Image (spheres, helix red, strand yellow):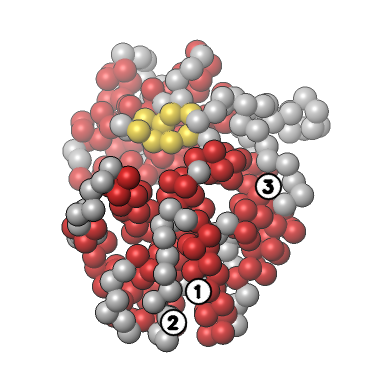
Amino acid sequence: MEFSARISEISKLAVDATLLGDGKLDISSLLAGIYTVAYDVFLKNCGTAERSMTTLITAATICDISLNGYHFPIGPALFQSPGLLFTQLSGEMKGFDFRRPVVVNVPSTVGELIHAIYRHLEGRTSIDWKHAASATSSLFGHLTPFKMNEPLGGGNLEGQPNTFPNSIQWLAPLWGKSASVRINHPELFILPACIYTDDRHHFHQLFDEIAPPAVKRLGTLRGTQAIDPSWVPWILQFSIEADLLRGMVYLNSSELATTLARHSQSLSGGSAIREGSLSAVFHSVYFASKQSPLGVSLVRKIAKILGVDSPL
């Protein structure tokens, strides 16, 4: 995923440099470390030495398929490692014509390349990629995406509480909407920079309806739209658990508590949002650490850092 995102970033930098009159930008220097390893794996397995924007975008397309599985965008590959699938599909690209010209800020050329890759793989794997997206769109596309700034409607749905929303009610319609967009604009998911650098207004027309409700910046989540307090625990849970698992490897308990405490400032808005963020931090930390002594210790340290009473 990071490799694919890196290619999009490089494309954006290349377009910006060209517009500024800098024709000497060394793209290869921007694709270093683990990104170079992934690119080399792709080139080796598909049997080409061609290092070009065409092979970079092809590699990003293989990344997208590998992360989502054969039947994207319904869900990830459950029975095969994305890394192994990336290697396998890279090998299936042998014989593909990488001389196809592509201009990164002309979305139609990127889209044509991606569809050519799909057709090539369809002949090798018997998977109809466009049909898979169409099927997902038919299954979920008629649903209306649930708005993050609207209550779940507990008062209207008998027996359903409005304190903790069901994420599927929001995610399923987004799967359908994403599939509908992917049918005609797969480049939005594979090389979003190509649309953004060409027409920002068109980019936001396609992206805003499926945009995440929050983005992470400097250790805290910031809402991209108004968010009802009842959504806070669900949004924060995954971010907190990721930081906890990563921090248990690299940080001591005090440093980890400081990192996790930043989440209390996430999605800050009204007092209800702040209270929900704080409650979600304590809850997620405690249960993600298996209700262990470490969890109790972290909750107490976080409370001390924030100057509030510890619930444990």
Tell me which residue sits at (36%, 81%) in the image.
Answer: 46
Tell me which residue sits at (63%, 68%) in the image.
Answer: 130
**Amino acid of disc 2:** Phe
**Amino acid of disc 3:** Pro
Number of marks: 3
Tell me which residue sits at (56%, 24%) in the image.
Answer: 226
The answer to which of marks 3 and 1 sits earlier in the sequence is: 1
The disc at residue 117 is: 1
Which-is-in-front pick, marks 3 and 1? 1
Tell me which residue sits at (20%, 45%) in the image.
Answer: 250
The answer to which of marks 3 and 2 sits earlier in the sequence is: 2
Q: CA distance from mark 3 to mark 1?
A: 27 Å
Q: Is any atom of residue 146 visible in this view?
A: yes
Where does label 2 land, which residue?
96
Image quarter in which the C terminus is found: top left
Q: Position of residue 233 (x, y in %)?
A: 51, 32
Looking at the image, do the residues carrying marks 3 and 1 touch, with CB atoms under 8 Å apart?
Answer: no
Q: CA distance from mark 1 to mark 2?
A: 8 Å
Which-is-in-front pick, marks 3 and 2? 2
Question: Callout 1: few (<14), some (14-19), or many (20+) C-alpha neighbours within 10 Å?
Answer: some
The disc at residue 173 is: 3
Q: Position of residue 284 (x, y in %)?
A: 43, 36
Q: Quadrant of residue 253?
A: top left
**Amino acid of disc 1:** Ile
- Badge 3 marks a residue whose secondary structure is helix
Above-or-below relation of 21 to 132: above
The disc at residue 252 is: none
In front here: 130 or 162? 130
